[in-house]
Amino acid sequence: MSLYERIAEDYDELQAAALVRAARYVSELTRVFDAAGHTVDLGCGTGHTCRLLHDSGWTVTGVDRSAAMLAQARRRAPGCDFLQEDIENLAAPPTADGVVCFGDTLNHLVSDGAWQRTFGWAGEILADGGVLAFDVVTPHDHRDVWPHWLEVSELSGLSLIVRGDPSSNPRRARLLHTGFVEDRSSGLWTRFEEAVEHVSHDAETVVAWLSEAGFEEVSYRDGDTLEDATPESTRWFFLARLPRKAGTGLK
């Protein structure tokens, strides 16, 4: 059983800061459209972003590989459609006006080609003027923050310790998870351990890959403040747009 299968019921409580960021990112996405359309949420997790988009008038398709996370998402956002797929092997849904990928999902793609294929996939399914919005952890965060990371969470039925791997480097970093989860039917506790690996790229590389996928007017900002990015930014928020034709619903 994977980490995300184990923590699906507690994920939102563990990721409270990420949920706040997602709300701000959704506001940024909707700001650039005259009218809501169809959006695909890659790595939708428990459906928090899907619900925000749906409540803003969007038709939403959420995609995640975890059945347990999707079960939570279907309860949270019953008005949305959901697909169980791996982001590295995506089918082509109906044409979308927006693609979002929040919660540093892209950092889980450990090969350069996987990032490029995902950008290419988004470029293919988006309508003219469509927008790709995503956030990623920066090389600075992987190099200077993750090796020293320590977080302890005590929830009902779950205890989780997250430690940074000192061997982390600017391109590849790991967080080591040690947890104890309660079986709520038997009351027995099970210990688990899992490492989550991330890969990051400098902003110039990401911009170049987006351009190769057909996106223009690519911008990125500090993912926590939405102000201009700085060398100390630990997260970037990207907006990338395909070329527009007359009559698209984009400002």
Image (cartoon, rainbow, N blue to C red):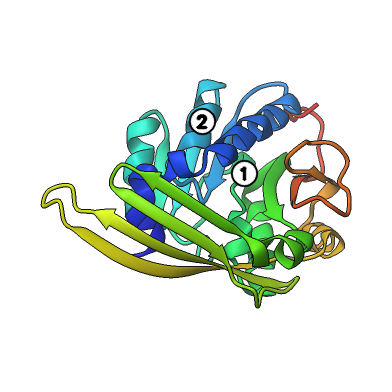
The amino acid sitting under disc 1 is: Val
Q: Which residue is mark 2?
A: 59
> Which circle, 1 or 2, is nearer the viewer?
1
Q: In this view of the protein, which residue sits in the foreground, 140 or 236?
A: 140
- In primary-sequence order, the first of circles 1 and 2 is 2
Residue 68 % position (x, y): 32, 51
From this view, report whether residue 107 is shown above or below residue 183. Answer: below
Q: In this view of the protein, which residue sits in the foreground, 159 or 247?
A: 159
Quarter of the figure that contains the N terminus: bottom left
Give residue 217's quadrant in the image: top right
Q: Which residue is mark 1?
A: 100
Query: Residue drawn 48% across and 35% down?
Result: 48
Query: Residue drawn 71% across and 60% down?
Result: 145
The amino acid sitting under disc 2 is: Thr
Mark 2 lies on a secondary structure that is: strand
Q: Residues within 10 Å of mark 2 (few under 14, many from 20)?
A: some
Q: Residues within 10 Å of mark 1 (few under 14, many from 20)?
A: many
Q: Is residue 176 left or right of residue 213?
A: left
Q: Residue furthest bottom?
A: 167
